[in-house]
Amino acid sequence: MNINSSLLSGYQTLNDIGYLLKNRQRVLLVTDKNIAGIPAVQALIAQIKKKVEQLEIIDSVPPEPTHHNVAEILTTLKNTDVDLVVGVGGGSVLDVAKLLSVLCVEDSPSLDSLLNGEKPTRRTASLLIPTTAGTGSEATPNAILAIPEKETKVGIISPVMLPDYVILAPELTTSMPAHIASSTGIDALCHLIECFTATIANPVSDNYALIGLKKLFASLETTIAEPENLAARLDMLWASYYGGAAIAHSGTHLVHAMSYPLGGKYHIPHGVANAILLAPCMAFVRPAAVTKFAQVYDLLPDANPQLDEEQKSLALVDYFAALVKRLNLPASLDALGIGSEHLPSLVQAALDVQRLMKNVPMSVSADDVREVYLTLFANEKMTQGVN
Ligand SMILES: NC(=O)c1ccc[n+]([C@@H]2O[C@H](COP(=O)([O-])OP(=O)(O)OC[C@H]3O[C@@H](n4cnc5c(N)ncnc54)[C@H](O)[C@@H]3O)[C@@H](O)[C@H]2O)c1
Ligand SMILES: [Fe+2]
């Protein structure tokens, strides 16, 4: 699968979008209320208004959107006859924008049929501008929707949804509160490390993953310590983009499969659910990926070259656990008010995400999944005991 969007990146590149609007008359801009309030986004909207005949703005996309949210947005659209869909936001907004770029063309499949696996064949032109770093949605063929009736999430997947244009503008991400920059950064980390170790990993996805991991290790914590550091923010946008590109060529596995039920059933934000699962899942898959873990360990800014492969792979898992802690992200499910009585349904829902479970680089039984979830409850009990 090719990632062939035209890509603009860097500070103030939003000023250069005039030529993308050439010959566009009817633009649909998808965002959410937080993002619509960012001054750089308001300037972008003013710029678009000046250039096109008609601009409709949808700013009602909620975090972790459900299929009901998308259906509702479709009913409120004044005009579906648009010639450019612009998504400006985090993964929630970008995924909805990708779906609308498909659903706004004449004779498109309905949302229900997309959910049932029908593949779209075309879409209207699209421009995606991420404000988190992140999901990498701007580089993936996926749109993820929560399905409350099934208490999980599903991916609608088609290369048709890859956008025509992407803009990586670091000034759009400086307003992220630290907990969102941290959790979305961990999501990018999960995409990179899972795609790198998946059964379907390949030289293309490996290269994307290694470039992205190097940038992420160098810059994630800098963005938290220095929120206005645009070079670090841009590095993180690239890490996120490469994570998305790695997904397009490989796939995530255990963290994401076990995270979907946490998002779908308990509405835990995607990056937070992944942060809780990162170290326990990586500890589980490590024996099947020692060499690759050692390769990733060598990208850490303070890697110790004296360690052997086995030691490096173990040290990487420790680094993941320590990173989540340093970023002040929750490391347990108890901390989020989820009791272990929910274990059986969580295990079943995770096993049902076959699309991702088949990418885990070792066989995974229901007992294995249960054991990994259990450590999340045990962690909290240990912490509480210590405190
Ligand atoms: N398509 C994909 O390939 C893919 C991959 C991973 C996750 N996802 C999906 O993406 C969604 C999560 O996206 P996300 O993690 O980017 O978070 P999000 O889009 O849900 O945003 C989280 C919160 O941050 C706010 N926010 C975003 N950018 C901001 C900024 N610059 N300043 C201030 N506030 C800002 C939003 O308003 C929202 O309240 C989930 O639905 C997840 O399943 C999709
Ligand atoms: Fe993700």
Image: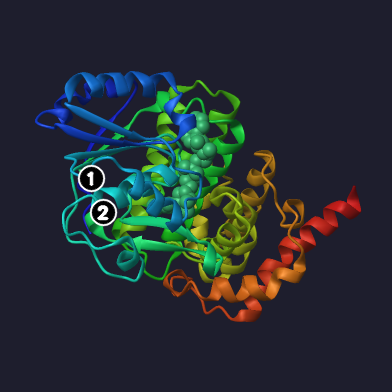
Q: Position of residue 141 (x, y in %)?
A: 30, 56
Q: Which mark is residue 234?
A: none
Q: Is residue 154 visible?
A: yes
Q: Quadrant of residue 377?
A: bottom right
- Seen in the picture, residue 11 relative to 34 is either above or below; the reply is above
Q: How is the image coloured?
A: rainbow
Left or right, 74 with reference to 16: right
For the question of whether residue 307 can be seen, the reply is no
Task: Decide: is 78 above or below 252.
Answer: above
Q: Nearer the viewer, residue 66 or 260?
A: 66
Tell me residue 28's x, y (percent). 27, 37
Residue 382: % across, % down: 84, 57
Q: Quadrant of the N terminus?
A: bottom left
> What's the residue at 63%, 44% (across, down)?
323
Q: Farthest left residue?
A: 23
**Mark 1 sits on what residue?**
80
Of callouts 1 and 2, the N-terminal one: 1
Q: Residue at x 69, y 44 (%)?
A: 325
Front tag of 1 and 2: 1
Q: Amino acid at mark 2?
A: Leu
Which residue was labeled with disc 2? Answer: 103
Q: What element does badge 1 sit on?
A: loop
370 over 122 or under it: above or below: below
SS category of the residue bearing label 2: helix
Crowding at dot 2, Cα within 10 Å, few <14 / some 14-19 / many 20+, comes out as: many
- The answer to whether mark 1 and mark 2 are in CB contact below 8 A is yes
Asked whether, in this view, residue 270 is left or right of residue 131, the answer is: right
**Alpha carbon distance from label 1 to label 2:** 8 Å
Residue drawn at (22%, 62%) of the image: 120
State whether residue 136 is above or below residue 11: below
Image-based side of 50 in relation to 92, left or right: left
